[in-house]
Image: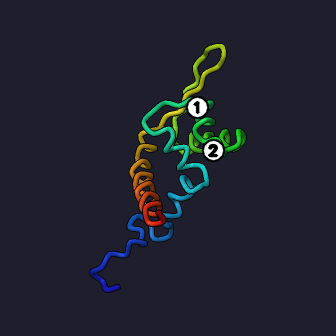
Amino acid sequence: MNKKEKNIFSNTINSNICPVHEGLKVIGGKWSLQIIYQIGTEKRRFGEMKRLIPEISEKMLIQELKRLVASNILHRKAYKEIPPRVEYSLTEYGYKVLPIIEQIKAFGNALIEKES
């Protein structure tokens, strides 16, 4: 690579930290992107998420939702009702992940077309 070409793997903020690694620490899990994709621009309750992603265990869904809330990707709103109601939605920070998911979706569709 000559000096005029931009190295896409370089980090302009801090040369000791890889930005791809940092991003993948938040959204790189098996279920993270699927959860974010299913929530999208909606508010979703736990039961809805379980129905939308039937392959995930209840324990794993709880863990991933908590992790995404702690990472400021999701917002959790608990209503003081009986029975208790909790809704999850994307934060402003979480909305930044949606274009990434759209690119992965386009890539997946291209793979499906190629295999058909």
Q: Secondary structure at mark 2?
A: helix
How far from the left and from the top, in percent, is residue 76? 55, 32
Instruction: Check disc 1 and report its element: helix, strand or loop.
Output: helix
Task: Give the total number of marks visible in the rendering.
Answer: 2
Furthest residue toward bottom: 2
Given the image, on which type of amino acid does mark 1 rest? Glu
Give the residue furthest to the left.
4
Query: Which residue does the image show at 66% across and 44% down from the upper left?
Result: 56
Q: Residue 69 at x, y = what percent? A: 57, 40
Q: Could you tell me the amino acid type at mark 2? A: Glu
Spot occupied by residue 54 in the image (x, y as percentages of width and height): 64, 41
At horizontal 54% and vertical 53% (from top left) the residue drawn is 27
Is the residue 79 above or below the residue 58 in the image?
A: above
For the point 53% across and 63% down, the residue is: 21
Q: Residue tagged by mark 2? A: 64
On residue 48, which mark appears? 1
User: 57 above or below 114?
Assistant: above
Give the image location of residue 17, x and y in percent.
Answer: 50, 66
Q: Judge left or right: residue 48 versus residue 15.
A: right
What's the distance in space between the residues labelled 2 and 1, CA to CA?
15 Å
Disc 2 packing (10 Å; few <14; some 14–19; many ≥20): some
Q: Which of these two is toward me, 36 or 74? A: 36
Left or right of residue 89: residue 8: left
State the residue in front, 54 or 12.
Answer: 54
Q: Quadrant of residue 104?
A: bottom left
Give yes or no for contact between labels 2 and 1 (Cβ–Cβ under 8 Å): no
First in sequence, mark 2 or 1: give its number.
1
- Viewport quadrant of the N terminus: bottom left
- In the image, 61 versus 114, the foreground residue is 114
